Amino acid sequence: MDLKLLAVMSVLAVATYIPFAQAKPISMMERCWCRSTVNTVPQRNIRELKFLHTPNCPFQVIAKLKNHKEVCINPETKWLQQYLKNALNKMKKAKQTN
């Protein structure tokens, strides 16, 4: 009887000292930020663009608007593709001059 009690107490003692994982649960990790996207957002209303690339989700573009709302923009939108192309060209030129 004493041996079983000692075993249970030691398991409980070890379990209380094991640190919990800091990672998010799997269900939270597999969720994508953008569940639906819009194709038309007036560019003058955009304050900031965020680009997210997570392992389980497609490339996501989040626009923070001037009215503090956030919308997901379809990455295939023409003006966004042109914006990304121009940004990449600008980065290449800046890298070449350094």
Image: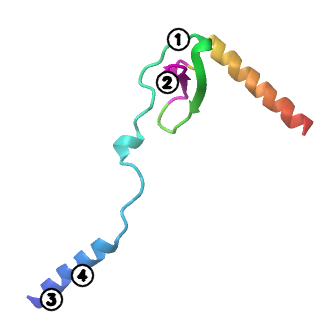
Q: For marks 1 and 4, give the CA distance.
A: 60 Å
Q: Residues within 10 Å of mark 2 (few under 14, many from 20)?
A: few
| Mark 2 residue type | His
Query: Which mark sits nearer the N-terminus, 1 or 4?
Result: 4
Judging by the rendered image, the residue that carries numbered circle 2 is 68
The residue closer to the viewer here, 76 or 22, is 22
The residue closer to the viewer here, 58 or 52, is 52
Q: For marks 4 and 3, give the CA distance.
A: 10 Å
Judging by the rendered image, the residue that carries numbered circle 1 is 39
Query: Which percent across, then down, holds residue 20?
Result: 36, 62
Q: Residue at x 43, y 20 (%)?
A: 36
Q: Residues within 10 Å of mark 4 (few under 14, many from 20)?
A: few
Q: Residue furthest left?
A: 1
Answer whether residue 74 is visible to the viewer in this image. Answer: yes
| Mark 1 residue type | Asn
**Image-quadrant location for residue 50:** top right
Q: Which label sits in the foreground, 1 or 3?
A: 1
Please state the extent of the stretch shown in magenta in the rendering: 58-74
Judging by the rendered image, the residue that carries numbered circle 4 is 10
Query: Which percent across, then down, holds residue 8?
Result: 18, 79
Magenta stretch containing residue 61, yes or no? Answer: yes
Q: For marks 2 and 3, give the CA distance.
A: 63 Å
Query: Which mark sits nearer the N-terminus, 1 or 3?
Result: 3
Judging by the rendered image, the residue that carries numbered circle 3 is 3
Q: Which label sits in the foreground, 1 or 2?
A: 2
